[in-house]
């Protein structure tokens, strides 16, 4: 009888020990699994953060090149248009499902500008990243990207030989210009808000009307006008804002008179 009781006690001790071991494994798993999933979440977040940063930087570079091409027409940068160009390059669907707070509307280019004197474009893009934590615990993180790019404005050639004098002409013009920066050559293009364009007048006192080529476009970012023209444009690349200037030798402009402003 004593032997049977001893065996029963041993069995009970072994059973309790096995139960304790299983409970210990369960507790460890309950503690380890959340930490594992949290680490996996952080890794995925870091990969997405790096991917979206690369895409925004590439989109900003592409948008800046568009502005650089337009610098020979208009030395003004429209931040809203730049933001729209970045979204078009990346894709609004990609941005809307990204970790950027606000999606495709979360990019801010308001600090970007173009220096008309140097022709240098200063690009500043910022956005906020949604953190993988409750907002009350960790606020969104702000990311800023800044870089500079030179406008594609070309260069001025000083002359061909010692006796050659260069002058500047445009298509269908009856005069030539000695100064490349003559106000008759360079269109005085301005970016104005859509609300005020109806009250503005050109130098002849005329009103501005929508351009036949681009007037149907979006005017949310403002419109472009010139002092000489009577049309407003929604794109700086519109053909109505372009003027081709040729540098030729003075001996080749027979039949053309000198500009009243710079030809003397």
Image (cartoon, rainbow, N blue to C red):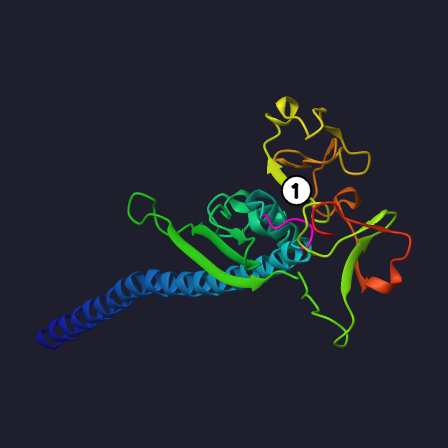
Residue 246 in which image quadrant: bottom right
Image spot of residue 191 (x, y percent): 61, 39
Q: Which residues are magenta?
A: 72-76
Between residue 212 and residue 11, name the one nearer to us: 212
Left-right relation of 4 to 49: left
For mark 1, does the 10 Å Cα neighbourhood hold few (<14), some (14 to 19), or many (20 or more) residues?
A: some
- The residue sitting at the front extreme is 264
Say what secondary structure mark 1 lies in.
strand
- The residue sitting at the top extreme is 199
Image spot of residue 67 (x, y percent): 63, 54
Residue 233 in which image quadrant: top right
Between residue 46 and residue 174, name the one nearer to us: 174
Image spot of residue 105 (x, y percent): 54, 42
At horizontal 86% and vertical 47% (from top left) the residue drawn is 174
Q: Does the magenta segment cover residue 154?
A: no
Left-right relation of 124 to 66: left
Left-right relation of 90 to 38: right
At horizontal 56% and vertical 63% (from top left) the residue drawn is 149
- The residue sitting at the left extreme is 2
Q: How many numbered circles does the render carry?
A: 1
- Any part of residue 108 in sight: yes
In this figure, which residue is indicated by the disc labeled 1?
Answer: 189
At horizontal 59% and vertical 49% (from top left) the residue drawn is 82
Above or below 240: residue 245: below
- Any part of residue 221 in sight: no
Q: Quadrant of the N terminus?
A: bottom left
Between residue 138 and residue 152, name the one nearer to us: 152
Image spot of residue 47 (x, y percent): 48, 65
The prevailing secondary structure element of the residues shown in magenta is: loop
């Amino acid at each position: 009888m004593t032997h049977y009781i001893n065996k029963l006690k041993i069995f009970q001790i072994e059973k309790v020990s096995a139960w304790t071991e299983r409970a210990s494994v369960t507790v460890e798993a309950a503690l380890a699994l959340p930490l594992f999933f949290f680490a996996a979440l952080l890794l995925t977040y870091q990969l997405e953060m790096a991917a979206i940063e690369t895409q925004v930087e590439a989109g900003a570079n592409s948008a800046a090149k568009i502005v650089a091409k337009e610098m020979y027409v208009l030395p003004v940068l429209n931040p809203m248009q730049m933001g729209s160009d970045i979204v078009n390059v990346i894709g609004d669907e990609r941005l809307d499902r990204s970790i950027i707070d606000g999606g495709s509307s979360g990019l801010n280019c308001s600090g970007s500008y173009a220096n008309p004197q140097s022709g240098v474009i200063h690009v500043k893009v910022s956005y906020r990243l949604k953190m993988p934590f409750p907002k009350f615990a960790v606020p969104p993180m702000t990311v800023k990207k800044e870089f500079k790019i030179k406008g594609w404005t070309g260069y001025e050639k000083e002359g061909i030989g010692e006796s050659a004098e260069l002058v500047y002409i445009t298509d269908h013009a009856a005069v030539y210009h000695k100064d490349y920066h003559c106000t008759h050559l360079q269109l005085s293009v301005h970016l104005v808000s859509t609300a005020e364009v109806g009250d503005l007048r050109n130098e002849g006192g005329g009103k501005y009307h929508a351009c036949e080529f681009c007037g149907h476009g979006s005017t949310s970012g403002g419109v472009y006008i010139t002092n000489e023209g009577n049309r407003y444009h929604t794109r700086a690349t519109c053909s109505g804002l372009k003027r081709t200037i040729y540098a030729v030798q003075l001996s080749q402009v027979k039949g053309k008179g000198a500009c009243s402003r710079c030809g003397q």
